[in-house]
Image (cartoon, coloured by chain):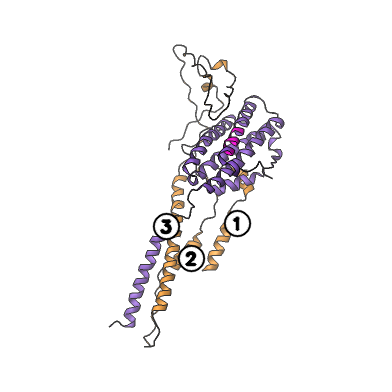
Chain colours: A orange, B purple
């Protein structure tokens, strides 16, 4: 059983991407599950086999003086250990089983649709004055604002001239 | 009188009960995660400080090497100044436990505007992921300090995404990234020598 487990882990470990690969691929697209070293079905099967009570052939009652407490105690320890291992394994499996449910959702589009707003009937009110002082606790001096974009006034031009493409968002 | 056969049968039942108990205990045992502590805070905030050092050095080098113009240049200038403030903030929080600035090598990632932009996007996104991944492991005070930075890092990430024509806010909640994966990904950049 140990051989099966270690082989399974070794196979999974080979799937783990290197840091360089992680950096090159970062960030993953939504819905694309990152490859992780997870317990393989072989390992799960091995653990289950270990924890499953098996029908042990009862030896004939030979009337010998074998003390039952020792083997029973050892068997109890083994059974408890196997049960605990299975429990931990199931605990680890629980969030992984939930992942595919979330992954079934359609991936978010790389760009989001931009709405075009109707022209206002009257000119928009002037923007509020730029505050001269920001939170001085964290910043020593006010950060210079972006150069004023005259086309933003009197209406939010950026909403209509953004760099994003119109795309219908898929319904979830 | 209990015969040996009866004893064995009872033992089998008892073993089954013990095994079931093990399953239940194993499933509900708390994960072995060390509780937040001042020592753990220092380790986590020092990794955050390392990220800030790298980001700051990246923007400084990009501004002098990548030939940035327009809003991308404004972005780099703005973020470079804010990363310096983050460094000072974390150094103050860590006191004498603060690590020193690492030696960095950004290779070709600051060679031109496109490479710079892509690397900046990854660095900022990863910075947000790093703070979020470690948030549960911080004490309350350090968490409050980290929250003041991660929100700004998130704005950085949104800004560079915007500049790259990407969705600035792709998710309603930040995707959970394992802390070790964040560290491994950051190592993969090869920026820290």
- Give the magenta-colored segment's residue range: B84-91
Q: Residues within 10 Å of mark 2 (few under 14, many from 20)?
A: some
The residue tagged 1 is: A14
Q: Residues within 10 Å of mark 3 (few under 14, many from 20)?
A: few
Badge 3: chain ID: B
Q: Nearer the viewer, residue A141 or A113?
A: A141
Percent coordinates x, y for residue A86 in the rendering: 44, 62
Same chain for the residues at labels 3 and 1, yes or no?
no
The answer to which image quadrant residue A10 occupies is bottom right
Q: Give me the residue at 43% from left, 47% from top.
A: A101
Q: Nearer the viewer, residue A137 or B71?
A: A137
Q: Nearest to the eye among marks 3 and 1: give it.
A: 3
The residue tagged 3 is: B29
Q: CB atoms at circles 3 and 1 under 8 Å apart? A: no
Percent coordinates x, y for residue B21 in the rendering: 37, 64
Percent coordinates x, y for residue A107 in the rendering: 49, 40
Badge 2: chain ID: A
Above or below for A121 versus A12: above
Q: Nearer the viewer, residue B34 or B165?
A: B34
Q: Give me the residue at 63% from left, 33% from top.
A: B117
Q: Give me the residue at 56% from left, 45% from top.
A: B42
Above or below for A109 versus A2: above
Q: CB atoms at circles 2 and 3 under 8 Å apart? A: no
Farthest-out residue, top = A122
Above or below for A115 versus B180: above
Percent coordinates x, y for residue A145 in the rendering: 57, 22
Q: Secondary structure at mark 2?
A: helix
The residue tagged 2 is: A46
Label 2 – label 3 distance at C-alpha: 22 Å
The answer to which image quadrant residue B55 occupies is top right
Magenta stretch containing residue A99, yes or no? no
């Amino acid at each position: 059983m140990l051989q099966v487990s270690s082989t399974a882990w070794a196979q999974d470990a080979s799937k783990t991407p290197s840091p360089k690969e992680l950096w090159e691929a970062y960030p993953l697209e939504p819905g694309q599950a990152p490859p992780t070293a997870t317990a393989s079905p072989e390992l799960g099967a091995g653990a289950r086999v270990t924890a499953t009570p098996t029908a042990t052939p009862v030896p004939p009652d030979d009337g010998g003086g074998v003390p039952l407490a020792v083997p029973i105690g050892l068997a109890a320890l083994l059974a408890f250990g196997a049960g605990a291992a299975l429990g931990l394994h199931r605990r680890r499996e629980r969030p992984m089983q939930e992942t595919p449910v979330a992954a079934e959702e359609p991936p978010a589009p790389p760009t989001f649709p931009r709405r075009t707003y109707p022209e206002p009937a009257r000119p928009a009110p002037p923007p509020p004055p730029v505050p001269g002082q920001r939170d001085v606790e964290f910043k020593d001096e006010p950060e210079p604002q972006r150069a004023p974009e005259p086309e933003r006034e009197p209406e939010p031009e950026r909403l209509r001239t953004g760099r994003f493409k119109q795309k219908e968002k898929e319904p979830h | 009188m209990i015969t040996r056969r009866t004893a064995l049968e009872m033992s089998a039942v008892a073993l089954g009960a013990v095994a079931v108990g093990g399953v239940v205990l194993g499933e509900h045992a708390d994960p072995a995660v060390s509780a937040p502590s001042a020592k753990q805070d220092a380790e986590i905030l020092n990794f955050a400080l390392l990220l800030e050092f790298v980001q700051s050095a990246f923007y400084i080098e990009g501004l002098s090497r990548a030939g940035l113009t327009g809003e991308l240049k404004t972005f780099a200038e703005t973020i470079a100044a804010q990363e310096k403030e983050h460094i000072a903030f974390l150094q103050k929080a860590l006191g004498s436990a603060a690590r020193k600035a690492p030696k960095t090598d950004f290779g070709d990632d600051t060679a031109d505007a496109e490479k710079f932009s892509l690397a900046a996007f990854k660095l900022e996104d990863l910075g947000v992921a790093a703070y979020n991944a470690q948030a549960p492991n911080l004490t309350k005070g350090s968490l409050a300090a980290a929250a003041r930075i991660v929100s700004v890092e998130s704005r950085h990430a949104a800004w560079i995404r915007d500049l790259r024509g990407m969705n600035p806010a792709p998710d309603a909640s930040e995707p959970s990234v394992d802390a070790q994966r964040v560290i491994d990904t950051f190592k993969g950049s090869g920026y820290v020598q």
